[in-house]
Amino acid sequence: MVTAFVMIKANTGEADRLRSDITGIEGVESAHIVAGDVDLIAKAMVDTPAAVKEIAATQIQGIEGVEDTQTYIAMD
């Protein structure tokens, strides 16, 4: 099992809608609106690194209102 955290920058005023959209993606365990350099953090748990790429680079980045993402894969 691969655990990854996706840091998401959102357009102004889009965080609540984006959180709802992101939590609907298969493999995403949770998504939280946060304070700091990013607007949301999503946690994904999937079978392969390729599935992480599908979630972060295709599905999350494909949502209107997402400005940027950074993905971190857990090592433990």
Image (cartoon, rainbow, N blue to C red):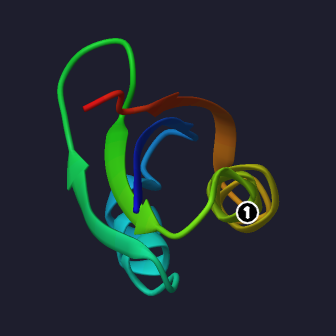
Q: Residue at x 44, y 87 (%)?
A: 24
Q: How many marks?
A: 1
| Relative depth, front residue between 52 and 20 | 52
The percent position of residue 65, horizontal first and vertical second, equals 65, 54
Residue 12, placed above or below residue 20: above
Q: Which image quarter is the C terminus in? A: top left
The percent position of residue 70, horizontal first and vertical second, equals 58, 27
Q: Is residue 56 left or right of residue 27?
A: right
Q: Residue at x 48, y 78 (%)?
A: 21
Q: Residues within 10 Å of mark 1 (few under 14, many from 20)?
A: few
* Disc 1 element: loop
Q: Is residue 28 left or right of residue 60?
A: left
Residue 39, placed above or below residue 42: above
Q: Residue at x 81, y 61 (%)?
A: 58
| Relative depth, front residue between 35 and 4 | 4
Q: Is residue 61 left or right of residue 32?
A: right
Q: Which image quarter is the N terminus in? A: bottom left
The percent position of residue 57, horizontal first and vertical second, equals 78, 50
| Relative depth, front residue between 3 and 76 | 76
Q: Which residue is mark 1?
A: 64
Residue 37, placed above or below residue 68: above
Residue type for callout 1: Glu
